[in-house]
Image (cartoon, helix red, strand yellow):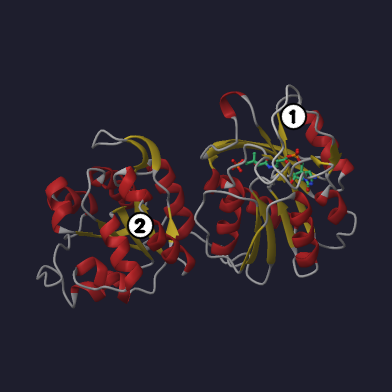
Amino acid sequence: MFNGKKVSLCITGGIAAYKAAEIVSWLKQNNALVQVAMTKSACRFITPLTMQTLSANKVMTDIFCEEVEGVAHIELAKTDLFAVIPATANIMAKAAHGLADDLISAAILATKAPLLFAPAMNVNMYENVHTQSNIKHLTSVGAELVEPAEGRLACGDVGRGRLASVQELKDKISSMLLAKQDFAGKTVLVTAGPTIEAIDPVRYLANRSSGKMGYAIAKAAKMRGAKVILITGPTNIVQPAVDLFIPIQSATEMREAVLENFSACDIVIKAAAVADYRPLKVSEQKIKKSENLMLELVKNPDILQEIAARKGDKIICGFAAETENMHKNALLKLKNKNLDLLAANPVSGKDNAFGSDENRLTLFFKDGQVRELDKMTKDKAANTLLDAILELV
Ligand code: PMT
């Protein structure tokens, strides 16, 4: 699959280091040339011998390492993908601040290859303001991040900090290594996340969208060479390196931002879960408690329908979030909203797309084709959706 592409896989110190072994083995089996580098701490969790055996290559463990010809950190930097798995708070702090006091941090500074960090650490370390600001900086200058998962951590704490699943890491590595520049010259507008509709200064109406699907599409399009405009409701996701990032709150604000940028784009992908209704009146003061509260709601404009009505030769892809009769409802939306493509997903039951790292999409094309996709990571689903869109361009 990888046809001799070079991967520098850097392992930093954490209990998740052992999971890097599976990634190295998979890369090697798929014909990548793997150069493993390990920090001293990583070597205490898993041996260089394991990595040397799996990669069929000498492992770099020191900036002055003599096993490698040439200057170690420069050789490590010359690669098609530079991945740090697992990435400690320390290595990300060094990378964010341009420190170069060991093999891996020096190579990060020297590399021109796409950079990938897969953090794993204690939840408090991950959520720490410094770690978050370092991550924000790294992603804003183009590094890719595979967010850690939530769960029980090796230290006994519970929260976000577990290394992402091996499948998620493989999908991300594949999409980065195989990224074709097949969206070069195209401007893609993506909407993501929920919209929130104010009731009063304290309360709002919202939905369960996390923004993961829309952000995955924006990142995949960027990686494939598109100019990307991401219009997003409030999420907890780190801002990705897109060309224009427009945070909004309400459906009205999203509509304004979409209309303002519509003429500049070739493709629109509306993954946002836009609130269908908003309170007729937004109270200026906090509404006092009473036995019952009646809220009068008015319909929000359907942004997708509005832009599709004047789409010209632009490609418009909508989403449909359904809890029942998915095929029937999706076909109706495809037709009524005059779309080129509609990606439908379940939002209840075991395949609920809301908040999940995975999605099971069914694609409905305007020529009547229906394509049921397997359940896959949102990164992979995003790339599969982009492949389908390219068929229409
Ligand atoms: O964010 P995640 O947690 O990753 O979850 C992903 C998702 C489930 C939110 C996403 O995959 C998804 O299905 N997004 C569309 C949700 C939705 O609003 O579906 P809908 O069937 O209500 O709307 C149909 C389409 O019309 C959507 O493209 C929507 O963006 C658009 N719409 C809806 C209402 C409105 N007023 N304006 C719109 O443009």
| Of 59 and 2, the residue lying toward us | 59
Q: Which residue is mark 2?
A: 131
Q: Residue at x 70, y 43 (%)?
A: 273
| Of 142 and 62, the residue lying toward us | 142
| Of 25 and 315, the residue lying toward us | 315
Crowd rating for badge 2 (residues with CA inside 10 Å; few <14, some 14–19, many 20+): some
Rendered view: 349 above or below 259: above
Q: Is residue 187 left or right of residue 176?
A: right
Hey, what amino acid is under mark 2? Thr
Rendered view: 351 above or below 181: above
Q: Label for residue 326?
A: 1
* Res 8 seen here: no
Q: Is residue 227 left or right of residue 131?
A: right
Q: Position of residue 149 (x, y in %)?
A: 40, 41
Q: Position of residue 133 (x, y in %)?
A: 41, 61
Secondary structure at badge 2 equals helix
Hey, what amino acid is under mark 1? Met
